[in-house]
Image (cartoon, grey):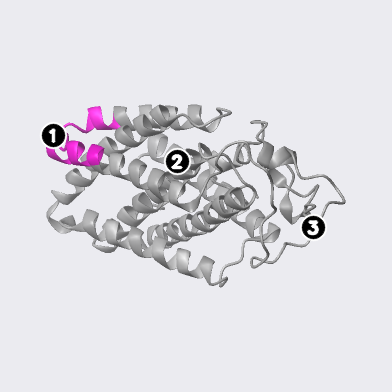
Amino acid sequence: MRSSNPVFSRRGFSRDTGYAGFNAPQQAGGPTANPYAGTNPYAQGGNPYAQDQQSATQAPPQYAPQSRPMTMDDVVARTGMTLGTVVAGATVGWLFLTENLGFAIGAGLVAMVLALVQSFKRKPSPALILAYAALEGVFLGALSGFINDVPKLNGAPMQAVLGTMAVFVAMLVAYKTRIVRVTARFTRFVMIAAMGFVLLSLVNLMFMVFGGGDGLGFRSGGLGIVFGIVGVVLGALFLALDFKQVEDGIAYGAPREESWLAAFGLTMTLVWIYMEMLRLISILRGD
């Protein structure tokens, strides 16, 4: 299952690693022959929803891996490390760069470049991922500190953090209880909606740059509130796709190193939600 998250949409977990857990099912006809032979999306790069989705309660395919596969503990540990780096960078940005947004914006642009580089790499690079997290944190911290200094917006960053946490927990519960089911139709809808959202954002930016003011009005007023809510909802839907990606990677025996890719994708999605939440709160509080 490929997520609309740019990290995951580039490729499935370890498609080209040659990992035995993906490409070496046990011999056909044996007592433990793999019932899913030929349907592993990571081995073939196919869409697991091309056929009817297997029940979430079925046991995952059994393989004879050459090395320890990724576990949920690995994903949690790497995600915690990556988010911790974001927080550390944000602390630096908040304390020292609130009045120097130029440097912070530069850090954000470099973080964007690093994210793109990692997105197109065949294998996850922990150093690259942590460097992205640190620089992204510096940008977020400086921007948040700047916003927090505005009298009307004092406390808005903390509200955005709490809102992001609430969205994450709510979507995790909805996904685990199968209130939200990730299907091929769900994925197509999210991808189309995301492309439309990004396109409208770029058009609005062009109008702001060349026409001045608020462009098409997506950054203020009632239309800005609606646009902000859509952004938060899209971020939540991205989380569902990311959860499915991680779940499939674990079920199909992705190598342990792929937990860094999962952490990277989840971090990017949470950054998206935080930024949209911060913008929405700023509009609602009248600035």
Considering only vertical position in the picture, is 136 above or below 32?
A: above
Magenta-drawn stretch contains 103: yes
Mark closer to the chain start, 3 or 2: 3
Q: Determine if residue 55 is in view.
A: yes
Q: Which residue is mark 3?
A: 51
Three-letter residue code for mark 3 = Gln
Q: Main secondary structure of the magenta part?
A: helix
- The answer for how far apart the CA atoms under marks 1 and 3 are is 54 Å
Q: Position of residue 24 (x, y in %)?
A: 74, 39
The magenta span reads 88-105
Residue at 50%, 32% in the rendered image: 124
Q: Earlier in the sequence, mark 2 or mark 1?
A: 1
Marks 2 and 1 sit apart, C-alpha to C-alpha, by: 26 Å
| Residue denoted by label 1 | 96
* Earlier sequence position, callout 1 versus callout 3: 3
Residue 7 on the magenta segment: no
Q: Which mark is residue 264?
A: 2
Residue at 80% across / 52% down in the picture? 33
**In which quadrant of the rendered view does residue 115 lie?**
top left
How packed mark 1 is, by other alpha carbons closer than 10 Å (few <14, some 14-19, many 20 or more), is: some
Whole-percent x, y for residue 7 in the image: 53, 39
Q: Horizontal placement of 6 versus 31: left or right? A: left
